[in-house]
Image (cartoon, rainbow, N blue to C red):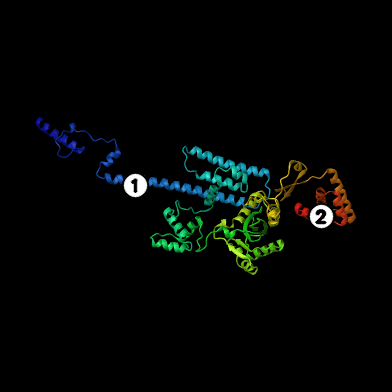
Amino acid sequence: MSTESGQAQPEGLLARCRLAGGVKGSTTPCSTRRPRRQGNRLTSLFETDGSTDRRSQVLDLIASVGTLVLVLSLFLRATEFVFYHLLLTLVDFVSALPRDMMVPEAMRLYRENIALKAQLEALERHLVRIEAPKRVSLSVRAAQVFAYLLTRGDEPFHRYFLSAPRTTILRWAARFRSTRRPPPNAGRPALDESVVELIVTLKRENPPWGQRRIREELRRMGIRVSEPTIVRILREHGFSPRPGRKVCFDRVRAAAKDALWALDFFWVKTAKSAWLQALLVIDIHTRELLDIRVHDGWNVDSVWTTRALNGVFGRTKRKPIGVVHDHGPQFFGHFQRQLHVLEIEQEVTPVRIPQMNCYAERAIGSIRRELLRHVRPHGAVDLQFYLDEYRRYANTERPHQGLEGRTPAEVSAAVPEAEVIDLVALRSRRLVRRAYAHGLLQGYALIEGVVPGLRVVVHLVFRLVSALGDSATPPTPRTRSAGRAIERSVAGRGLCQVLWDLRRGAPSDLGASASNAIAVDGC
């Protein structure tokens, strides 16, 4: 029985080992086998028969989580962009409303403080968030655009207190205004330098060729370049795209007075946020500003341009041989027919080459730098006053570098240069200041000094002459100007000579002095 039980015991033990995971048919005792390790659940999943399916499920789960995080970050960034877009659109609309010409000092300082605080807080958050220099965050750009829009029109603040260049802020402002964002790296790749050199060589060796002829020649060589690209390359290298038409500055220069006038329009923004157009007419040889006429509005037609030019002819009693201007629609149609009737040659500059009308462009730049940056006119009448004052100042007081330091009026009248005076003569003269445009522009001259006692005598003589004419009539600005002319005549010719001239009835030279005084002093 013990033998039977001894034989049955191994058989039962083997069956239990098989149930516990032993290998079928193995003769190894159960006590000598190592039990399976159950600690790592993920390893046990991969070691089963369906390990490939479960591995793919885990990888799909990880990819789904990553995609969800990416979509969520993109959604948050889009939400932030939309929020800044709406906020800055509102600020842009509010800041563009009409304001008074002079903003109170407290309000200006309040706006500047808010703008600086917005930029400072955004930059502090940006510096705390990053340690290495990376791309500027969207919140910093939004704060910069907010500061720019809040202080619109404050030139010193934009120049010294904005934390980014103005071009960058304007580019981001346009991006915030637009709901569609341009794709990165958009546009065609740059043209190879060898192709550019080939285009320039073909144009240089064949001046009559235009962009179409060059394109066909390149196509025969197996090179495909569009006509707009060829036009841009030719303009960048100083060639005109038109066949047989060279970019020559000799045809926009003048060798004599009234040989060629230059015309151009420029825009001016008023204090009420209204845009006005102004026509500039300049004599290229003498650099005289013949007229700066303001149009009360934005849309200028050829009829108004013709009337303005006819006004210049009637006021100056001068007529040019030719005029040069750009391709603006104001210079064609009725204007072109009027020039044909008057037998005035019309020279049109090439498209998008403002250097060909450099004299007018340079004068417009001087007007902006010396006048329009310091004043904000209320309307067309106010702007016309300031431009007339600048025209008088530029023609009679402002030395021109292209005229060897002489004024346009001196060149036009062929006035000789002033002689060098010695120190004794300098001490006997006094400095006279002439103000233009309410003191924004200054003109100076040295004239012979008048003795204080002689000034009193001249004043009494002038009062006596006025009383003899009409004792009940108060002195007018014209009579005051005549008195100043008499005073200058006394300084130059002496009291006795002036009194003798007055006794004879104010001869022509004294009248001319009075007229010059009226013209200079602005009475």
Write the residue at 77% across / 54% down. Answer: 516
Label 2, residues with CA under 10 Å away: few <14, some 14-19, many ≥20: some
Residue 234 appears in the figure: yes
Q: Foreground: 439 or 113? A: 439
Judged by depth in the image, the label closer to the viewer, 1 or 2, is 2
Instruction: Using the image, tell me which numbered label, if any, was put on residue 510.
Output: 2
Residue tagged by mark 1?
60
**Quarter containing the N terminus:** top left
x then y, percent, for residue 54: 30, 45
Question: Residue 58: x and y, percent?
Answer: 33, 44
> Quadrant location of residue 213?
bottom left
Q: Which mark is residue 47?
A: none
Q: Residues within 10 Å of mark 1 (few under 14, many from 20)?
A: few
The secondary structure type at the circle numbered 2 is helix
Identify which amino acid the numbered label 1 is placed on: Asp
Locate residue 348 relative to residue 452 in the image: left or right: left
Question: Tag 1, which secondary structure?
Answer: helix
Is 178 on the left or on the right of 274, as rendered? left
The mark nearer the N terminus, 1 or 2, is 1
Cα separation, mark 1 vs mark 2, equals: 104 Å
Residue 298 placement, left or right of 71: right
| 364 sits to left or right of 245 | right
Residue type at tag 2? Leu
Residue 70, position as x, y percentages in the image: 42, 46
Viewer-side residue, 61 vs 392: 392
Expressed as whole percent of the image width and height from the top left, the position of residue 503 reads: 88, 55
- In which quarter of the view is residue 345 placed? bottom right
> Residue shown at 54%/41% (left/top)?
122
At 42% from the left and 45% from the top, the residue drawn is 69
Q: Nearer the viewer, residue 411 or 5?
A: 411
